[in-house]
Image (cartoon, rainbow, N blue to C red):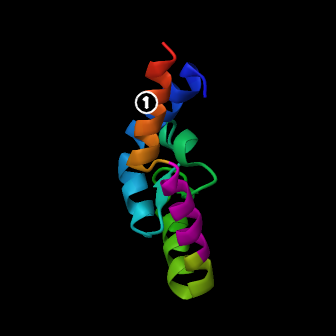
């Protein structure tokens, strides 16, 4: 991992810590598609346009109605959260600093 990749991961981690906490606790995540957050979580959580409460409601209703869909989102989010486990992040820190 290059230093730039590590810094990008660290910034992403800082921006989406709350999202990762939910994912790690196997809670499905939905978020607005605002710049910053969108780039961090895109493809891994359910995104909806800012102020589009109907789109948010659709996401929530789909999660409540379909247990298989719910579980697939939870599984996807949980796998993503494991990438930011504190042990892995600590190892990345050590790797970057040992290369300096």
Instruction: Find residue 93 and report its horizontal and vertical position in percent.
Output: 43, 30
Depicted 21 relative to depicted 5: above or below: below
Q: What is the quadrant of residue 94 in the picture?
A: top left
Q: Nearer the viewer, residue 36 or 23?
A: 23
Mark 1 Cα-neighbour bin, 10 Å: few <14, some 14–19, many ≥20: some
Q: Residue furthest front?
A: 98
Asked if residue 52 is among those painted magenta in the image, a careful observer would answer no
Residue 73 in the magenta stretch? The answer is yes
Which quadrant does the N terminus fall into?
A: top right
Report the magenta stretch's main SS: helix
On screen, residue 24 above or below 60: above
Q: Specify whether residue 99 is in view.
A: yes
Dot 1: what SS?
helix
Q: Is residue 98 left or right of residue 48?
A: left
Quick check: can you spot residue 66? no
Is residue 10 shown above or below 30?
above
Query: Which of the two residues, 35 or 72, is positioned nearer the viewer here?
Result: 72
Q: Position of residue 56 (x, y in %)?
A: 50, 65
Image spot of residue 27 (x, y percent): 43, 69
Instruction: Identify the magenta region.
Output: 72-83
Q: Give the labeled residue for mark 1.
A: 93
- Quadrant hosting residue 11: top left
Q: Position of residue 63 (x, y in %)?
A: 53, 78
Identified at 58% across, 27% down, the residue is 5
What residue sits 54% from the left and 48% below the top?
41
């Amino acid at each position: 991992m290059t230093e730039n990749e590590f810094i990008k991961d660290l910034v992403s981690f800082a921006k989406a810590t709350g999202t990762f906490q939910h994912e790690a606790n196997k809670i499905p995540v939905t978020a607005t598609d605002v710049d910053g957050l969108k780039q961090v979580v895109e493809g891994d959580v359910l995104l909806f346009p800012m102020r589009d409460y109907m789109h948010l409601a659709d996401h929530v209703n789909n999660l409540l109605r379909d247990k298989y869909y719910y579980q697939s989102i939870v599984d996807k989010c949980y796998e993503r959260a494991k990438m930011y486990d504190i042990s892995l992040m600590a190892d990345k820190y050590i790797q970057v600093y040992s290369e300096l």
